[in-house]
Image: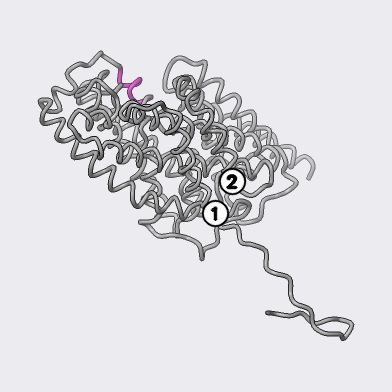
Amino acid sequence: MSQTPDRTGGPQQPAPPAAPVDQDFSFEAVPLTQRRGFWRVGFVMLGFTFFSASMSVGATLGNGVDLTGFIWAATIGGIILGAYTGALGYIGAKTGEGLDLLAQRAFGTRGSYLPSALISFTQMGWFGVGVAMFARPTGDLLGVGPWPIVLVAGGLMTASAYYGIQAIEIVSFVSVPLIAVLGTYSMVTATRDGGGLEAIFSQSTGMTLTVAIGLVVGSFVSGGTATPNFTRFAKTPAVAVITTVVAFFLGNTLMFSFGAVGGAFSGQDDIFYVMIAQGLMIPALIVLGANIWTTNNNALYTTGLGLANITKIRKRPLVLASGVLGTLTALWLYDNFIGWLSFLNVALPPIGAILVIDYVWRRAAYRRPTDPHRTVVWGSVVGVVAGGLSGALVDWGIASINAMVVAVVCYTVGALIRRGRDRTRA
C-alpha cells in the first residue's frame, strides 16, 4: 500500500484510496485513451437506428408512395438525416464531449438544463414505448398479459444501460447481425412470395414527396440529436462521421424497407408479423427483442447523462430510476405514441441545430474549458422554444427543418447582440 510522509516526522500514514473512475464520463470529455475504433462505434450506432418505430414509418411510406417515390424519399430524407447527425457526430468526436457538455457551451451552464431536460424525458418516453412495443405482441403470441413481459424486458434493458457504453457495445454486437440477417431473409422471401417490389408499392394513396421526406426525417431526427453521446468515444472524427452516416442512412432505410414489406405482406407495420406469418416464431421474437433492446439501451443511457447534467449526480443511479419510471409507464406511453412522436419531432431538432451553429461560430472556444460565467445564452434558449413552436404550428414544409431554421436564426440574432454588447463594454 502506498504511503504519504507525515510532516511532523512521525510514521508514514496510508494514502487515501483513489476516487472511483466514472466510466461513463458524465461530467468530462472522454480521454483519447478510452476512444474506440470503427467497428465498435459502428455497431453501437447501427443498433441505435435499428428501431421498430421506423418500420411503422416504412409501412406508411409503402402505402403512400410508389416505388420511385419510396426511393426518392428514403434517399433525400436519409441525406438530410445523415448531414444533421454527421455534423453532431463530428463535434462529439472532435471534443470528446456528449450532448449535455456541448449544451453547457452553447446554452450556458444553467441554460443547458433546458436541452438536458427535453432530451432526458423524451428518451425516457422512447424507452417506455419500446418496452411496450416488445411486450404487447409477445404477450399476444404467448397468450399472456403484457405486464409480466413489460417488467422482465424493462428490467433487463435497464440493467444493460446501467453498465454504460461497454454493455451497449455487447448488446449491439449480438443484435445488429441477427436483425440484419434474419430480417433481410424474411423481407426477401416475403417480397418474392408477394409478387415483387412493384406489387408491394402498388397501393399508393398519392402521398406527396414532401410529406414522405418529412416522415423519413422525422422518424429519427429526435433520437439523432443524442449522437454526440456515442461518437465522443470514436478515435477520430472520420470514424464518427462515417459510422453515423452509414447508420442513419443505410440502417434507417433497412428499417423502412422492413416496414414497407410488412405493411404489404401481412397488413401490419412490423417485420415481426411478417415472420410470424412465415412460421418463423422464434426468429421473430429474436428480431423484435434485439431491435428494441439496442435502441432502448441508447435511449436510457442518454436519459441518464441528461439528468446527470441537471442534478450533478452520476449517471448510473439515474439510469435505474429512469428505467423503473419508463417501465411502469410503458403501456400508457404506447397508447399515446402518436402524440409523443409529434412532440419529439419539433422539440429536439432545434437543440442539435444550435449545437452545430455554436461550434461553427465559436470553434476556438471549444479548445478551452467551458466558461462557468456563461450561465444562460438567451439566443439559444429562445431558439429552442421558437423553433419548437414553429415546427408545431407551421403547416407547410418539413416540421423538423422549419424548427431548425428558426432556431439557428434566433441563435444568430442573439450572438450578434451579445457580440455588440461585448464591443461596447470594451
Mark 1 Cα-neighbour bin, 10 Å: few <14, some 14–19, many ≥20: some
Q: Please provide percent x and percent y for residue 153.
A: 44, 38
The image position of residue 43, as x and y in percent, is 36, 50
Q: Is residue 94 placed above or below 281 in the rendered structure?
A: below
Q: Is residue 212 magenta?
A: yes
Total numbered circles: 2
Q: Is residue 370 visible?
A: yes
Quadrant housing the C terminus: top right
Q: Nearer the viewer, residue 169 or 403?
A: 169
Disc 2 residue type? Leu
**Label 1, on which residue?**
95
Q: Quadrant of the N terminus?
A: bottom right
Q: Main secondary structure of the magenta part?
A: helix
Residue 402 visible in image: no
Q: Position of residue 16 (x, y in %)?
A: 73, 71
The three-letter code of the residue at mark 1 reads: Thr
Q: In the figure, is residue 402 to the left or right of 374?
A: left
State whether residue 33 is above or below residue 278: below
Apparent side of residue 244 relative to residue 377 in the rendered image (left or right): left
Tell me the tag on residue 223. none
For marks 2 and 1, the one nearer the N-term is 1
Q: Nearer the viewer, residue 265 or 378?
A: 265
Query: What range is drawn magenta here?
Result: 208-213
Judging from the image, what secondary structure is the residue with disc 1 in?
A: helix
At x 52% / y 15%, what residue is drawn?
A: 393
In the image, what residue occupies the spot 51% across and 50% down? 92
Which residue bears the numbered disc 2? 102
